[in-house]
């Protein structure tokens, strides 16, 4: 009786912990989405006050999550070390991004990916809808920008930058595809294709359009069973290649090399800036704030010190060697774990996509965009990857129903087939020996069994 009570209490605590985590993610995404728009205030609160309120609410939710999240003492110490490391990197770099990402990973135990995708879909799709409506209604300003020497202005459609519109639209579509993972059909690709058209022809944001095209293609391909079997190996190989290529171009970029120059031009000088900050400042263990770096004027007239739009290069120069090392190791280990467990679900597919997109953006370390990083919590707490997407596990289990068999003795066939006679036959699966075959015989001993399929189940009856 006591074990039953403990089980119920554990389940209730798990669900309560999941609820406060999802609430924290909602506030976090809401703040990120609102900060990308051109709104001056939200419900009478100016943007800085609204941001502070959301941050406090997220911290309060994490404080409640501590009461419901259970782990061993050693795992708890490791989690505490990661949080302490993130705080040190924040103080050294002046960037709170690493703290928020680590907190969502540390408190991500027992969390599922589809509720996170549902929250992201609601927040970002509503943000796009309301911002565009308010823009055309004249409630918020339609800020226009020029891309260098390009002809014509880029409309922001109610956002603080055209690229912000593209990012919100990208994240809404990626969340939708995550929710549909395993069932994505050609009709599901209509909205992503229309979104790509809007990104290109309305706001001219090429990076987000290309990212959505890659994400939709990979989601559609990798959801099929033949691809799922190779998914962990493919993802592992691509991840290693992307990480190695990122650090190679960061360290060895040569504008005199035709390949380097062409790729740099296609990526809007991303290779140049990665190499510039890598060679211009020494690497640190915990990060650097680049306060002594010259200010760079971006397209939206915002002056910033650090311009590195590659996840792995950005992590290395901004948050230091230790954080970059842990990120790369975690990516490799999570796909090795997936290969060992034979698991490839929506969370792992999304993570693989974000690893690829990290070559040209810093989205891969921003939890509002890359909530697939919650998969790292399975490494921290040694939990199965399948728990990230239990609906996919149940769906796969339903594909191979157990077909009951009837065992009868048939002594006349025993001499013909010998001891191997009577092995169990399973439709749709491998032939597996039963070990001890047959029924307990009358008198002298055991006789092998013959498998008969029940005709009433719609399968062909046969005897071997």
Image (cartoon, rainbow, N blue to C red):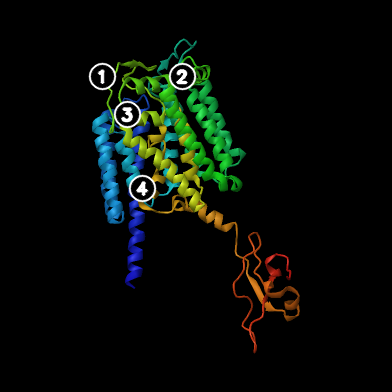
- Which residue is nearer to you in this view: 221 or 134? 221
Label 2 – label 1 distance at C-alpha: 24 Å
Tell me the residue at 53%/21% (across/down). 201
Report the Cα–Cα distance between label 2 and label 3. Answer: 20 Å
Position above or below: 439 against 134: below
Q: Is residue 201 left or right of residue 294?
A: right
Q: Secondary structure at mark 2?
A: loop
Q: Earlier in the sequence, mark 2 or mark 1?
A: 2
User: Could you tell me how far apart the alpha carbons at marks 3 and 1 are, in whole angstroms?
Assistant: 13 Å
- The residues bearing labels 2 and 4 have C-alpha atoms spaced at a distance of 35 Å
Figure disc tally: 4
Q: Is residue 144 above or below residue 167?
A: above
Q: Residues within 10 Å of mark 4 (few under 14, many from 20)?
A: many
Q: In the displayed structure, would residue 102 be above or below residue 306? A: below
Q: Which circle marks residue 268 in the picture?
A: 2
Among numbered discs 3 and 1, the one appearing first in the sequence: 1
Q: Quadrant of residue 164?
A: top left
Q: Are marks 2 and 4 in contact (CB under 8 Å)?
A: no
Can see residue 229? yes
Sooner in the amino-acid sequence: mark 4 or mark 3: 4
Q: Which residue is mark 4?
A: 108
Which is nearer the eye, 449 or 200?
449
Label 3 sits on residue: 318
Density class for disc 1 (Cα within 10 Å; few <14, some 14-19, many ≥20) is few
Q: Give the CA separation, mark 4 to mark 1.
A: 36 Å
Of pointers 2 and 4, the one earlier in the residue sequence:
4
Position of the C terminus, as image quadrant, is bottom right
């Amino acid at each position: 009786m006591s074990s039953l009570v403990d089980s119920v209490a554990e389940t209730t605590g798990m669900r309560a912990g999941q609820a406060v985590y999802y609430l924290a993610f909602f506030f976090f995404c809401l703040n990120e989405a609102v900060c990308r728009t051109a709104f001056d205030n939200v419900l009478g609160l100016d943007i800085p006050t609204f941001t502070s309120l959301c941050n406090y609410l997220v911290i309060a939710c994490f404080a409640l999550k501590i009461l419901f999240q259970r782990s061993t003492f050693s795992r708890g110490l490791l989690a505490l070390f990661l949080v302490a490391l993130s705080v040190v990197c924040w103080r050294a770099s002046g960037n709170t991004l690493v703290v928020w990402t680590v907190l969502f990973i540390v408190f991500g135990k027992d969390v599922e990916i589809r509720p996170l995708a549902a929250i992201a879909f609601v927040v970002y799709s509503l943000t796009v809808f309301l911002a565009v409506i308010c823009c055309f209604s004249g409630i918020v300003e339609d800020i226009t920008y020029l891309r260098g020497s390009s002809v014509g202005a880029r409309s922001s459609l109610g956002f603080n930058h055209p690229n912000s519109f593209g990012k919100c639209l990208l994240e809404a579509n990626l969340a939708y595809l995550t929710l549909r993972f395993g069932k994505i059909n050609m009709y599901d690709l209509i909205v992503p294709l229309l979104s790509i058209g809007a990104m290109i022809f309305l706001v001219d944001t090429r990076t987000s359009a290309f990212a959505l095209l890659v994400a939709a293609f990979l989601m559609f391909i990798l959801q099929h069973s033949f691809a799922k079997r190779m998914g962990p190996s493919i993802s592992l190989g691509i991840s290693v290649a992307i990480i190695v290529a990122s650090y190679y171009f960061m360290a060895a970029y040569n504008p005199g090399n035709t390949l380097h120059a062409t790729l740099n031009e296609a990526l809007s000088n991303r290779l140049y800036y990665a190499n510039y900050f890598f060679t211009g400042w020494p690497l640190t263990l915990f990060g650097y704030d680049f306060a002594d770096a010259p200010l760079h004027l971006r397209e939206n007239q915002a002056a910033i010190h650090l311009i590195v739009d590659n996840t792995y290069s950005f992590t290395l120069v901004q948050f230091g060697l230790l954080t970059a090392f842990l990120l790369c190791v975690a990516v490799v280990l999570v796909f090795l774990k997936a290969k060992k467990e034979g698991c490839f679900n929506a969370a792992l597919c999304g993570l693989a996509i974000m690893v690829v997109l990290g070559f040209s953006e810093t989205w891969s370390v921003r939890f509002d965009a890359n909530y697939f990083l919650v998969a790292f919590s399975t490494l921290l707490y040694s939990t199965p990857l399948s728990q990230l997407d239990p609906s996919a596990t149940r769906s796969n289990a339903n594909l191979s129903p157990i077909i009951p068999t009837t065992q009868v003795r048939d002594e006349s066939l025993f001499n013909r087939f010998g001891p191997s006679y009577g092995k169990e036959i399973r439709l749709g699966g491998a032939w597996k020996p039963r070990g001890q075959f047959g029924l307990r015989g009358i008198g002298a001993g055991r006789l092998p069994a013959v498998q008969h399929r029940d005709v009433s189940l719609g399968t062909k009856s046969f005897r071997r």
